């Protein structure tokens, strides 16, 4: 197996003879101070008939299918607002530099005798997913069990799993396979929801360090207050793209489970190998709301005529009138008669 894409909260592996790309990964996290829920949706493409997704969790997790409508609701709530902003002087696309037809916008029994201990705490079929929930005493045990069941961890990943074993975390191993036999994994997969106890808000990221290409994390966080990562864990500083109270009703209101605060975060990891831990999120100093604003630039007009043109034309008219007045005044000015010529005095 080879890593196709290190998901933000796990690792995705597939047969190296096939292709599998994750075109988009979206995750929503809800935390009430005692329990945590993660809903993740993957959009995949390629010709792989199956793949495996491995995710560590701090406590025993229950796994179910998520609500497809959740991410549509999140997209709608966190979308930037558009505001029109007038500009005085013409720009590209405005007359006389263009037609003005542009949009104006700028701006993731149980062992053979003598094998390492692995506990299977649950296994179920959820839509296109074959889900196994595992415990393991060491990374080698997890690797052995996965091999017996058709999975194989990429080289070096057992080392990355060691901190989770030391903390007695468990694992969710998911086989991704199309409902139709022989079909390839493609399109938006049904979202998976994981519920587990947690006295801190964590988002597993350590396994993403095995990614071979730059990674981008998009994360929706629902909690009692606005939240922020404690550190960048090897990536660029996270950007807040939305912060505000969650509206009641609908898929988002059901997932929020009451009045909660939504924080949307985006973070880039140009060099995934630098990822040195998991995200732990904490409350920010204030719950100040934030929403992105996109200004749609519009040329300032009056009666359909650009104001700059009216202004420039007005100035031109004033100058012309002033020049005409000066000429007219010059023409009406009386001409002084020549001084009289006096005859020289007689010579005596």
Image (cartoon, rainbow, N blue to C red):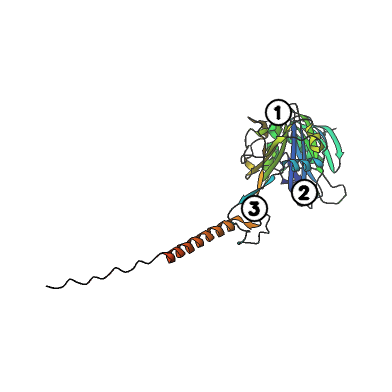
Indicate the secondary structure of the residue bearing disc 1. Answer: loop
Residue at position x 43%, y 65% in the image = 332
Please indicate, yes or no, whether residue 202 appears anywhere in the rendered image.
Answer: yes
Reading the image, the residue beneath label 3 is 298
Residue at position x 77%, y 44% in the image = 42
Where residue 133 appears, as percent x and y from the top left, is 81, 34
Question: What crowding class fits label 1: few (fewer than 14 Cα within 10 Å), some (14-19), or many (20 or more)?
Answer: some
Q: Which mark is residue 83?
A: none
Q: CA distance from mark 3 to mark 1?
A: 47 Å
Reading the image, the residue beneath label 1 is 200
Reading the image, the residue beneath label 2 is 44
Q: Nearer the viewer, mark 3 or mark 1?
A: 3
Where residue 106 appears, as percent x and y from the top left, is 64, 51
User: Which part of the image, by quadrant, shows the C terminus?
Assistant: bottom left
Please tell me which residue lies in front, 333 or 248: 333
Q: CA distance from mark 2 to mark 3?
A: 39 Å
Residue at position x 39%, y 65% in the image = 334
Please tell me which residue lies in front, 173 or 83: 83
């Amino acid at each position: 197996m080879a890593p196709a894409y290190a998901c933000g909260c796990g690792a995705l592996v597939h047969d190296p003879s096939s292709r599998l790309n994750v075109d988009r990964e979206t995750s929503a996290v809800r935390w009430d101070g005692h329990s945590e829920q993660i809903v993740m949706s993957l959009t995949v493409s390629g010709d792989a008939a199956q793949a495996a997704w491995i995710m560590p969790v701090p406590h025993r997790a229950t796994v179910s299918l998520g609500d497809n409508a959740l991410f549509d609701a999140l997209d709608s709530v966190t979308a930037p607002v558009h505001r029109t902003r007038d500009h005085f002087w013409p720009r590209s696309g405005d007359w006389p530099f263009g037609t003005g037809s542009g949009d104006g916008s700028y701006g993731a029994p149980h062992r053979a005798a003598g094998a390492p201990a692995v506990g299977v705490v649950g296994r179920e079929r959820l839509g296109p997913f074959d889900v196994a929930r595992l415990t393991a005493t060491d990374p080698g045990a997890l690797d052995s069990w996965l091999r017996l069941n058709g999975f194989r961890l990429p080289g070096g990943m057992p080392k990355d799993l060691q901190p989770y074993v030391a903390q007695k975390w468990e694992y969710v191993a998911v086989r991704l396979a199309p409902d139709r036999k022989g079909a390839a994994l493609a399109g938006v997969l049904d979202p998976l929801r994981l519920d587990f106890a947690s006295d801190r808000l964590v988002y597993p990221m350590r396994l993403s360090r095995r990614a071979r290409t730059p990674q981008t994390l998009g994360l929706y966080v629902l909690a009692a207050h606005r939240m922020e990562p404690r550190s960048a864990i090897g990536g660029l500083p996270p950007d807040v793209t939305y912060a505000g109270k969650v509206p009641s009703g609908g898929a988002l209101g059901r997932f929020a489970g009451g009045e909660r605060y939504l924080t949307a975060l985006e973070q880039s990891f140009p060099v995934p190998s630098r990822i040195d831990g998991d995200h732990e999120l904490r409350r920010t100093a204030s719950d100040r709301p934030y929403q992105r604003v996109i200004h749609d630039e519009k040329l300032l007009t009056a009666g359909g005529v650009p104001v700059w043109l009216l202004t420039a034309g007005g100035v031109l008219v004033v100058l012309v009138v002033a020049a005409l007045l000066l000429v007219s005044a010059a023409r009406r000015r009386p001409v002084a008669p020549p001084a009289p010529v006096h005859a020289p005095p007689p010579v005596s």
